Image: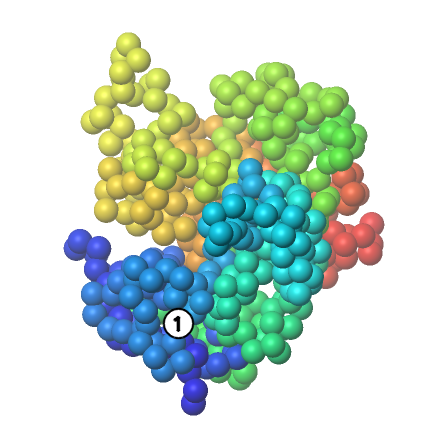
Amino acid sequence: MNYHVEARNIVKRFGPTVALNGAGIAIAEGETHALVGRNGAGKSTLVSILTGLQRPDEGEVRFAGEQAPALADRDAWRRRVACVYQKSTIIPALTVAENLFLNRQTDRGMINWRELRSRARELLATYEVDVDADTPAGDLGVEQRQLVEIARALSFGARFIILDEPTARLDGPAIDRLFTRMRALREQGVTMMYISHHLDEVYEICQSVTVFRDARHIVTRPVAGLPHDELVSAMTGEATLAYEPRARTAGERVVLAGANLSLAGRYHDVDLAVRSGEVVGLAGSASSGKVGLAETLVGLRRPDSGTVTVNGTQVKPGDVPAALRAGLGFVPEDRHHEGFVPLLSVAENATIPIARKLGRFGVVSPARRRAKARQLIEDLQIKTEGPEQPVGDLSGGNAQKVVFARALVDDPSALVVINPTAGVDVKAKQALLGAVEDAVERGAGAVVVSDELDDLRICDRVLVMFHGRVVKDVPRGWTDHELVAVMEGIEQ
C-alpha cells in the first residue's frame, strides 16, 4: 500500500513522562484516517511530531516514503502537512486576506495590498470558502475560521491535513457542511487525519481508525465492520462507558432566575427559573441564542432588558464579579480563552475565586492553596504531576477538569456550564457530568448548555430555543428524535 504519512516506532519523553512509547500510524494516500484515544493517550504529542514542532527521541516520520525534513526547514514542513487545531491560530485583529498570507505577503520588500487581496479572493474561491477577504478575522464564526485555516493550509501546497477536534464548537448543520467539504477535498486527493472524541463522526467520515492508549498504539482497523463496543474497548481497555443520570427531586427554592431577558440579535423575552436540586438544559442550534442567554446569566453579556437573580439577589447586569459573589459558578464555552491561565499552576487556576479566603491581609498562603488544590484534584480525578504543574501542560480533558474545579471551589448555589464535555474523552465526560450532579445533590441548581445530546441527559428538563425564543420545555425521558425535531424547528 502507498502510505502518504508514516510515523514509525515513535518514542517521546518529557522528563519522567513518556508521552509516546513506540507508537505509530500509517495513513494511506487519499484517505481520511481517524486517530482516537482518551485524553493523555499521546494524540497531541504525535500531532506535534507530525507537524515538525517536536523531534521524536526515537523513531522516524516519512511522507510519501521520504524522510521528514529537518525541523528548522519550516517551509518544507508546511508543504507537507498542516494542522487545523481545536484552538484557532487565526489572528483576530488581522483581515482574512492578511491571515491567509501571513509571513508571505511579499518577496519584494513592499506589500502590494491590492494584489494581496486579489490573491486571497482567488484562494477563497478555489476552495469555496464564502468569506470576504477584507473581513476582520475576529468577526468570523467558528466554522468560517476553520475553513479559512484549511484554505491557508492548502495554499502552501500541503496535501496532508490534520483536523484536531474540528466539530467541538459546531452545531449539526455546520458539521454537515464541514463533512461535505472534507469529502470534496478527499476527492481532490487530499489526505486527512481526523482527531475526535465523537465516535459517530469517525464512522461517518473516516475510512480507517487508529487507537492510542497510554502512549502506545493499540490497533488500526478499517471503520467498516468495526463494532462500536470494540472501538470503545480499545480506547478505554474496558467495555462501553455509558453515563447513567441520577434520579432526584428538586427543591422549592429558586437559586437562579432570569425575567423578561432580551438582547438584540441573540434572544427575546426569555423567562427562566432553576430550583435547588434541579438541572435545566438549554438546547438549540448555534443561532438559537442559548449561549448568549447563558452568558447573560453569568454577567458576560449585558441584556437590553430584564433581570437576573442569583440565590435571591438581583445582580447588576453584565457584572461577572457580582454574579460570582452572589453564589454563581461558571464553566465558559471556550476554556482556552476564558477558562484558565495556561502559565499558572493547577492550584492557582483552581483557587482564583477563593484567593481571599486562603490567607490574611491579602496574602495567599501557598500551603493552604496547595491543600485545597489537592482536594480538588482528588475529587475531580485530575491527572496531573501535582498542584504546581502549569495547566497549559495538561491534556484537554484534565484542563477542563481544572476549569470545573474553579467553578465549584466556592460551593456555588447555582452553576452554569457551557459545552462542558467538548473535546474530552469518555472517562473525562463521566467525571465532568458527575461533578455537575454532585453539586446539584449538595443543593445547587444547574444550567447545562450543550450541543451534545448525551450531556443533556442529566437534565431534569430541557428548554429548547429557536431563533432567540424558548419554544418548548421538554421533560426528562425524551428521545433523540423528539429533541432534535424541536431544535431544528420541525416540531414545537
Residue 409, percent across and down? 39, 31
Q: How many marks?
A: 1
From the viewer's perspective, is 163 left or right of 142? left
Q: Quadrant of the N terminus?
A: bottom left
From the viewer's perspective, is 21 left or right of 334? left
Q: Count residues near mark 1 (Cα–Cα under 10 Å), then give few for <14, some for 14-19, many for 20+.
A: many
User: Residue 480: which quarter of the image?
Assistant: bottom right
Q: Secondary structure at mark 1?
A: strand
Residue 356, percent across and down? 35, 17
Image position of 449 with respect to 430: above or below: above
Q: Residue at x 54, y 23 (%)?
A: 320
Residue picked out by circle 1: 211
> Colour scheme of this structure image?
rainbow
Q: Residue at x 67, y 40 (%)?
A: 290
Q: Residue at x 56, y 78 (%)?
A: 189
Closer-to-camera residue (283/115): 115
Image position of 306 with respect to 340: above or below: above
From the viewer's perspective, is 15 left or right of 486? left
Viewer can see residue 365:
yes
Residue type at the position of mark 1: Val
Name the residue furthest bottom. 1
Closer-to-camera residue (158/351): 158
Viewer can see residue 241:
no
Image position of 392 with respect to 9: above or below: above
From the viewer's perspective, is 476 left or right of 93? right
Residue 313, percent across and down? 59, 16
User: Residue 81: which quarter of the image?
Assistant: bottom left
